[in-house]
Image (cartoon, coloured by chain):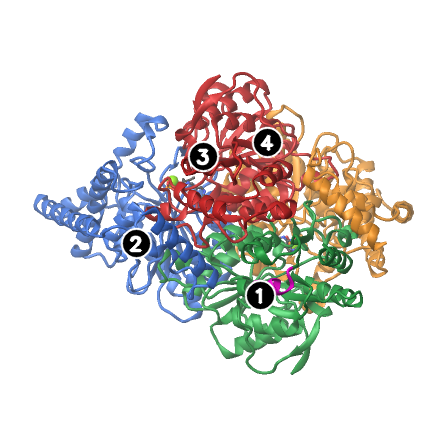
Chain colours: A red, B green, C orange, D blue
Amino acid sequence: MTTQSMIEAIRATLEDEMARDERVMVLGEDVGTQGGVFRATEGLKQRFGADRVVDTPVAEAGIIGASIGLATAGMVPVAELQFLGFAHQAFHQIGFQLGRFRYRTLGAFPLQVTIRAPYGGAVHAPELHSDAFEAMLANAPGLKIVAPSTAADARGLLTAAIRDPDPVIYLEPLRGYRLVRDDVPDGDHLTPIGAVRIARPGTDVTVLAWSFQVVNALEAAELAAEEGIDVEVVDIRSLVPLDEAGIAASVTRTGRCVVVEEAPRTAGFGAELVATVQELCFLDLEAPIVRLSGWDTPYPMPLLERDYVPDTARILDAVRRTAAY
Amino acid sequence: MTTQSMIEAIRATLEDEMARDERVMVLGEDVGTQGGVFRATEGLKQRFGADRVVDTPVAEAGIIGASIGLATAGMVPVAELQFLGFAHQAFHQIGFQLGRFRYRTLGAFPLQVTIRAPYGGAVHAPELHSDAFEAMLANAPGLKIVAPSTAADARGLLTAAIRDPDPVIYLEPLRGYRLVRDDVPDGDHLTPIGAVRIARPGTDVTVLAWSFQVVNALEAAELAAEEGIDVEVVDIRSLVPLDEAGIAASVTRTGRCVVVEEAPRTAGFGAELVATVQELCFLDLEAPIVRLSGWDTPYPMPLLERDYVPDTARILDAVRRTAAY
Amino acid sequence: MEPYRLLDPEGRLTGDLPDGLDADRLAGMMRLMLLGRRLDEKAIALQRRGKLGTYAPLSGQEAASVGSSFAMDTDVDRLVPQYREQLAMLHWGLPLGTYLLQRYGHPKGARLPEHGRLYPQQVALAAHAPHAVGLAWGMRLRGEPGAVICHFGDGASSEGDAHEAMNLAGVTDAPVIFVIQNNGWAISVPIASQTRGVIARRAEGVGIAGRRVDGNDVLAMYAATAEARRRAVEGGGATLIEAVTYRLGAHTTADDPTKYVDAAELEDARTRDPLVRFRTWMTAEGLWDDEREQAAIAWVDERIEEAVVEFDAAGPADPAAMFEHVFADEPPRLARQRAEYEAARELGS
Amino acid sequence: MEPYRLLDPEGRLTGDLPDGLDADRLAGMMRLMLLGRRLDEKAIALQRRGKLGTYAPLSGQEAASVGSSFAMDTDVDRLVPQYREQLAMLHWGLPLGTYLLQRYGHPKGARLPEHGRLYPQQVALAAHAPHAVGLAWGMRLRGEPGAVICHFGDGASSEGDAHEAMNLAGVTDAPVIFVIQNNGWAISVPIASQTRGVIARRAEGVGIAGRRVDGNDVLAMYAATAEARRRAVEGGGATLIEAVTYRLGAHTTADDPTKYVDAAELEDARTRDPLVRFRTWMTAEGLWDDEREQAAIAWVDERIEEAVVEFDAAGPADPAAMFEHVFADEPPRLARQRAEYEAARELGS
Ligand SMILES: Cc1ncc(C[n+]2csc(CCOP(=O)(O)OP(=O)(O)O)c2C)c(N)n1
Ligand SMILES: Cc1ncc(C[n+]2csc(CCOP(=O)(O)OP(=O)(O)O)c2C)c(N)n1
Ligand SMILES: [Mg+2]
Ligand SMILES: [Mg+2]
């Protein structure tokens, strides 16, 4: 066990995977000499050289498109998008090329590609740097999407993503990079993709969250406990594939559910969770599932983002209302 | 009243709006001399000239980006994307520029822009030509999204879209272009954006659908009626803004709900409808809301698309199950 | 910018015959060009009978496809094609029957040759250009021999992806050759509305080699591509070849070009038919004659007939294919959907 | 490709002084350049005290911004800026206090001048380039006078949007001028890794005029932009100006350039300081002296002080602003969310 911040865990994992498998390479804007704008790739170029740690031109579609080609040449690219908000410049390549090559070629061209992208609000960054865009990617078939909330899972999921034979979008919480620190298992640590983590067991209300909102949910759960409400926090971790069984098991037990996400509400991934839960747990539900989210507005100016991104107070309020329903 | 196919209604509306307002212009790939690959802009270049009906280079981000600029210069651009599947080449411009200019500039740069795009399956076109991508756009704030299922609404919603001070994505059903024919009111006909249409009143089960799936839903409703199930078909028409009240009113009455969409299920717009209904009608629901959709696979080869896109039989089956729950 | 040319419009060789072209290979090029011309006819007929979805005829572009393909080494080089590159795809070993099945929308039409050096045909314009760069770059990193050739059109060249790909090819020294088939049209949009620039000049802007070539001259296309390939495999980086040619047919079988193509312009273009030019020279050189033409046509027709037989024998599409190859392993949610599908299907039948 | 230059590195005029530059305007240019240099210092200090989010210093690029801006007519022309164009934005009438509020993340910082000729600062690289084209094209269609100027960086020039925009400018005869600030860096990535090409040459590939200009020479920037503007308003179409300059500071206040900038290279770049060059020439011409420098600095400092006062007086951000201006009319669903927000806020307070 080593205590690490998320960014340290990510950096260490990249280094270990590159050392383990010489086909693994890192590419993106500023990932080389500078080691990434958040230092996720610090030291990698020095250790593995400019052929395996590549500063690309500023061209997101090119980066993802090239990663597709690199994978078909037998490399294992780990592409960094500087912020998830610039994934959209590559949206056609991510959603409709990367996610479809295996299918299109009847399995002849599987793509072992990982895309890392920081995202999430409340760090005083402007729009596009902060927005949560998970749902748009989740609706594109053929992509796996993971979003760790602990340093241990940051390592476990990144290891699993890089070794996964299929494309994985790996979402990193800007706010958690340095704030979140926990024990990371030593050695080869893989977190299975497609399984929730019960971040806190509880009996009264299930809160479904992922990425940094798990931290808020855990805080809210502690506060709720003081009021006698026992909250179960389920860390979704893997949006695609979704652990339907794990989610259903929790809500079946509690009968009450709150979903937390940072994206605008309309057609956010929270809607998918609500729809899944109501399908699988219809008869167990004792209260309507509450969705917390960003609002259906563009991401506001940074001084207002605390009013936009769900926080502990809003989660606690929703938990109370749901418990009391 | 004139009986028209949807494509005729669209063409006539474009012509009338261009005649009414000289700021209205049409731009896109093949919209000029050829009159569009589906003939939606036929004759417009001849009548209004090459300055107002513009064959652009093949560059979707450029088309939408330029439309933004044109709107700020006082034009009223109606951009055509040849297929919605190529909207993704412009995804950053649509979701994160077009939808945000008013907000970003505190109202100083509103964008009166319409984007027309054909989409939808079961017409033997390859992937990307057929896929339903509504949810990805619906999660991007600042965009209105409409999808008519009748020729009358094709006219009414396109007129409303072009005159709306905000950007509107106007989705046209490939399969309905010539198949759907109905009476279109003469003169200035506007369909309000943000209001459902009760396509068929009923008392037992509500089916929520839009675009061509409304046609399938109506067919299924007729078959269900023979079995004694009285289906209410609600044509969503406007995905954003969503007529929550109209939807809730129907489901509150019937207590049962089936949602039909063509997109892959995970994070499709159907999830949003389920989440909204379960929130607003929780105590009225007598059965789980059933989602019908494409599968969580890429769009299959054309010979298999009838197995992919929901059809009358699947809707009828879902209606039966929901009614019997 | 005058296009590079080896055969003048009258079919006279104006320079040296490129290395590596013996009588057999020249005849092979002629045969593949003939195959293209006749495939167009056959496929259009099949489409009219409802057997194909849409078909994109290649007539007029035979020289650009075949010349550029023959200059590559299909044993090590890779092809990343746009649609309308059926000849290049066949040259890389795609069975013609598979190609027809693909145009029919049959799942079996998605099967690529085992050797893995042929990419799937791309639907989204220019989206495959960065793939070609990544592939070539990866081959360099892996120390694999060969180069990559990637075809796309004048229309596709306006897409952002084309620029990003070419610029990336420059900085990565990727052994890739972009062949831009400037056939005068992007569906109904003429090149004059597509760009005011010279496409080949874009190479200078991104620091790769650029060449404007007469795309109706199969020898010039061969020579320019061979030179580009030599540079690529020697570590000299990428090349952009603009093949100046003309689309003699419709965009696809769904298109009616009489609406927008000027009849006189088309007539004029026909006088520059690449097949005629090459045949004239071959005949003058004693490398071709009526007999060989007849034999070639018989061979071509036979291949097409065989393909149609294979096509007809494919049987109905298997719906189970719909759920396969999404991921290496099927996630539970998809398994549940498959069950839902099967239940609904039972019901429907 | 040798950049066009009017002032040599020693500050000697090597050609004719461009038309339209009298002593007053030259002094105005000098003042705005000085303002830029001092604004950097002040803003970095404010940022260190937690008053600004991040700030992108412009030092080194004063001549490219100011020269290109002064060549435009702000009464009719429009500016479509990237970040780091604070000087151009101020020239177009953005209050400095508003600019600082914007960098602080305050909603009031989003207010643009009433006249409407200034676009919002763009976050996504090159995404504003097609906007500029559409705007210019629309002005031509509407018969409005003037032209559009759009700045972006060498990094942004690699984006697909840049290519699509420039090609579209060509075919639409849009009166637009792209000024690419080639400052040697895209954050930590040097121009050699960004492209192997010559950016100015991209103009030929898309059929617009292109010019490579010494971006540290304010007179050359002025002259090249004035010529481009003349062409644009006379219907001659678009121009791409590559301003070859150097970023003397950090990418932003969040960046530590010592990690990747070679100290000797930076030292060398400092010898080409655009401010020094212009001041040398101005002084030699008798258009500038210590007294004027002191007066200008006083004027600059006063403007900055006023702006900071305005900035401090802005008050807290009003959360109600969060729900405003999504659409012309608020849809019911958003109204419901606003109520939900207000209920939660009451609860939180
Ligand atoms: C990204 C994208 N946009 C639009 C289309 C629709 N489309 C198909 S072919 C075509 C014209 C292409 O012209 P060109 O690249 O010159 O190729 P050609 O058909 O002439 O061979 C268009 C616009 C598409 N397939 N992909
Ligand atoms: C589409 C997009 N991708 C990535 C970024 C992140 N980013 C911000 S500035 C920058 C470098 C830009 O370099 P350049 O265009 O040369 O401008 P400069 O900073 O040198 O003025 C990057 C990569 C962004 N803002 N937008
Ligand atoms: Mg073409
Ligand atoms: Mg730069």
Disc sitting over residue A202 in the figure: none
Q: Nearer the viewer, mark 4 or mark 2?
A: 2
| Dot in front, 3 or 2 | 3
Crowding at dot 3, Cα within 10 Å, few <14 / some 14-19 / many 20+, comes out as many
Amino acid type, residue under disc 4 in the picture: Trp
The residues colored magenta run: B247-255
Mark 2 is on which residue type? Asp
Q: Could you tell me how far apart the alpha carbons at marks 4 and 3 are, in whole angstroms?
A: 46 Å
Mark 1: give few (<14), some (14-19) or many (20+) Cα within 10 Å: some
Of the four image quadrants, the one with ligand 1 is bottom right
Mark 3 and mark 2: span between their CA atoms?
A: 29 Å
Q: Is residue A104 above or below residue D208?
A: above
For mark 1, give the secondary structure.
helix
Residue C265 among magenta residues: no
Task: Give the answer, above or below, for where B114 lies relative to B285.
Answer: below
Q: Amino acid at mark 3?
A: Leu
Q: Kindly identify which residue carries mark 2.
A: D318
- Numbered-mark total: 4
Q: Main secondary structure of the magenta part?
A: helix
Marks 1, 3 in one chain: no
The nearer-to-camera label among 1 and 4 is 1
Residue A108, percent from left and from top:
73, 35
Crowding near the residue tagged with mark 4, few <14, some 14–19, many ≥20 C-alpha atoms within 10 Å: many
Q: Is residue C140 placed above or below B152 in the rendered structure?
A: above
Q: Residue at x 38, y 69 (%)?
A: D144
Of badges 4 and 3, the one in the foreground is 3
Q: CA distance from mark 2 to mark 1?
A: 36 Å
Which residue is identified by label 3? A218
Residue B249 is tagged as 1
